[in-house]
Image (cartoon, rainbow, N blue to C red):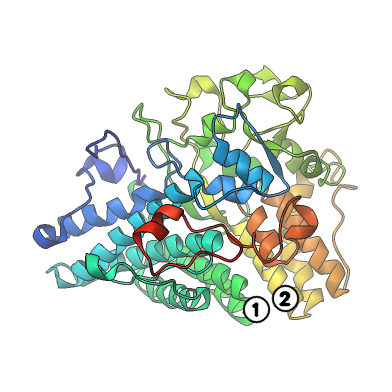
Amino acid sequence: MLRFALFTSILTLVSCQGILDKEPIAILDAGSYFNSEEDAVQALNAAYQPLVFSNANNNFYWAFAVVASDDAITGGDGSRPGITEMDAMTFTPRTEELNSFWKLQYTGITQCNLVLDNVPNIDMPQTRKDQIIGEALFLRSFYYFQLTQVFGDVPLFTKITPPDELKAPKTDKSEIYTQIISDCDRAAALLPASYPAKEVGRATKGAAFALAAKTALYQRNWEKVLESVAKVKAASAYALMADYQDNFRKNTQNNAESVWEIQHANLELGVGNFLNQWWASKKYEGYGFAEPSLEYFNAFETDDPRRKFTLASNNEDYFGVVYKPSFSSTGHSVRKYLQAKDSVTQRADGDINYTAIRFAEVLLWEAEALTELNRVQEAQVPLEQVRARARAQATDPATALPAVLTTDQQEMRDAIRHERRVELGFEMHRYFDLVRWGLAAQFIPGFQTGKHEVFPLPQAEIDLNPALVQNPNY
């Protein structure tokens, strides 16, 4: 599998399983390096590195998406005041996690632009060149999509920019969305549907169409959502796994339900998934951040098996120990992205991947778009696919999770929103869903309409770039 590794203060990078057995990754000097196919691959590999939820990256995207939402409270020991601020809606332009995230995304964008600016000039097989360009276009789009989710309007750079031109103003989010969809459609034409096993983790045709669909969802361009979802389905044989839990187990990752999955590895080098430590209960050698709220626990319907697959509760198995209410302040802890402590060499180096886009979510996008187009009866079909998978794993499938048969638009809209919450819980969608639905003030205490739809731009970036204007009311 494609694995990404970064450690030590001088950014020495090491090889590991799969593609990285061939050559180490490095952040490359474009002026002296881009001469061969091998150079292009190394540069592209470096563009994947900022995706990883590792201690080296300090990627706190999860705090914005989960802790700031109504699905979780801070937990932890107070050692990360910025995460406490996310929960309390008191974050400011000086909140450390925002500054780290901004830098991380633009590091990825810069590396993508290095690839896109230089690889076209390399003498190499055209099919290989096309694939590399397609991956870089997709990755740049993914980084920009996350930036717009968190900050709204941000500067848009589509090529390597001289230092004296970097002090650029923000680009309207609508223009960035247009760029993302254009780049994703172009990337899809260049990318394969799948890869050999040792290359798994690279962006695929289906992933590119899926990111275009998700971007169109945020634009409320429902016809484009349906068009892109149809292309996702045609791009590969995606399907829901019979067992919901297979999406969160080490040995069943990169499965038929995975559309875009960010790879992690346990290598004793600080390059694994740090959520394995950050989200685990303090009674299980974790930090206990992102504790599930009681509101989230109560959101599950009777006998919905996804509750126990997502959350640990009293007297249930918790990676080999018996869970007790004292394990968290809410009496519940997250299971997703966690694994038994004896299965990893270091607690913060989990090797459970983060699936940024599952096929279940693609089906829920389809249902949402059909509902917003008032094609409510058609929306029943993709919604039922998701519920039927969960129902089959219930204690009593005959009575659990009845099919949603309403033809009322608002009732279907509410049903789909509920389904997203329970199906995709703690997968880093909830806060941004509430914002795009215009419901955040209704569900999140302290949310201020006209302010908290986006987070503040980091003060350090405004100090460096006078052309940046702070988001309203910060």
Q: Which residue is mark 1?
A: 222
Residue drawn where x is 71% and y is 64% of the image? 449
Q: Marks 2/1: CA distance?
A: 7 Å
Which residue corresponds to mark 2? 370
Q: Quadrant of the N terminus?
A: top left
Of callouts 2 and 1, the N-terminal one: 1
Number of numbered discs: 2
SS at mark 1 in the image: helix
Which of these two is toward me, 34 or 451? Answer: 451
Q: Position of residue 121 (x, y in %)?
A: 15, 72
> Residue shown at 71%/69% (left/top)?
368
Pick the front one: 171 or 372: 171
Please state which amino acid type lies under the numbered disc 1. Trp
Circles 2 and 1: CB distance less than 8 Å? yes
Left/right of residue 4 with respect to residue 88 in the rendered view: left
Q: Is residue 251 left or right of residue 369?
A: left
Question: What x and y, as percent, mark residue 21?
Answer: 24, 40
- Mark 2 crowd level (few <14, some 14–19, many ≥20, 10 Å Cα): many
Instruction: Answer left or right for 66 relative to 52.
Output: right
Question: Which numbered tag is attached to residue 294?
Answer: none
Q: Does residue 447 appear in this view?
A: yes
Q: Residue at x 35, y 47 (%)?
A: 2
For label 2, the SS is helix
- Using the image, determine if residue 25 lies above or below residue 471: above
